[in-house]
Amino acid sequence: MTSYERLLAARSPDRPTALKYIERIFERRTELHGDRCFGDDPAMLGGIGELGGIVVTYLGIERGRNTEERIACGFGSAMPEGYRKAYRLMKQAEKFNRPVVCFVDTAGAACGEEAEARGQGQAIAQNLVLMQGLKVPVISIIIGEGGSGGALGIAVANRVYMLKNSVYSVISAEGCAEILLKDVSRACEIAESLKITSEDMISMSVSDGVFDEDFDNFDSMCGNISERLFADIQELSAISKDELLAQRYARFRKIGIFNEN
């Protein structure tokens, strides 16, 4: 598959959304709502659940499973109150020493007038600062499209994984084609240059691993993801808080380092 074909696969309405992964992977779930400032954003799921007996905080950007849900969720573009809800739940997780697991699937954060008026940039920036210093293990999985700061707002983690046909990019292929080439129809060409695939992310140390996709055997697929999450949480929980923060810092500092011969 080409990079653009991977992008189309990541955007497919037939792909499982964050809610489906959360329902399969976590037991004894309690969903939590609201940012204690403005309101609740259905595009940002959050709550508490159990993974192999370990209590965790989960977050997920939800696109919606039908037209009605997609409209309610802004097609997976979270508002500032969504990122502030995530901030609140991550602070709560740190207080009670709960690992954080995030599921990312968004073309980008909401960028309309209302989102800007309510402080979208600040909300995302505060999450980036918080996650870099969060004193509990953080694991993020790109399950579909990982677009721009909207994705990064819950993806500053100790481990970042991707599904085989998910993508991760600073900008959409269409947006980049419009800005650089003044021709949105050349998005297919631009997608190759952007290096957005899971293999590209592995080669650039942005992603730590890739999960195969097998939506026909979704329970088995989620079982594999659960095993990896459980093992990582045990490993990361065994090290000191200082080591945990140092590992996360070093992980992001090495991104973009390369040698020219």
Image (cartoon, rainbow, N blue to C red):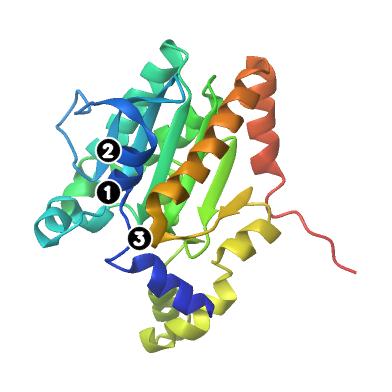
Q: CA distance from mark 2 to mark 3?
A: 16 Å
Amino acid type at circle 3 is Ala
Task: Answer yes or no: is residue 70 visible.
Answer: yes
Q: Secondary structure at mark 1?
A: loop
Disc 3 packing (10 Å; few <14; some 14–19; many ≥20): many
Q: Earlier in the sequence, mark 2 or mark 3?
A: 2
Query: Residue 175, relative to residue 62: is it above or below?
Result: below
Q: Earlier in the sequence, mark 1 or mark 3?
A: 1
Query: Residue 140, relative to residue 100: is it above or below?
Result: below
Residues under numbered marks 2 and 3 in contact, where contact means CB atoms less than 8 Å apart: no
Disc 1 packing (10 Å; few <14; some 14–19; many ≥20): many
Amino acid type at circle 1 is Glu
Taking depth in this image into account, of 184 and 200 the one nearest to the observer is: 200
**Could you say which quadrant of the image residue 173 lies in?**
bottom left
Query: Residue at the location (47% across, 78% down)?
Result: 4
Nearer the observer: mark 1 or 3; the answer is 1
Quadrant where the image shows the C terminus: bottom right
Q: Which label number is shown at residue 45?
A: 2
Residue 231, given in percent of the width and then of the height, sits at 60, 31
Q: Secondary structure at mark 2?
A: strand
Query: Residue at the location (67% across, 40% down)?
Result: 251
Q: Secondary structure at mark 3?
A: loop
Q: Which label number is shown at residue 168?
A: none
Query: Residue at the location (44% across, 19% down)?
Result: 53
Taking depth in this image into account, of 86 and 227 the one nearest to the observer is: 227
Residue 98, given in percent of the width and then of the height, sits at 45, 18
Task: Write down the residue under mark 1.
Answer: 62
Residues under numbered marks 1 and 2 in contact, where contact means CB atoms less than 8 Å apart: yes
Q: Earlier in the sequence, mark 1 or mark 2?
A: 2
Task: Write down the residue under mark 3.
Answer: 107
Residue 102, given in percent of the width and then of the height, sits at 42, 39
Q: CA distance from mark 1 to mark 3?
A: 11 Å
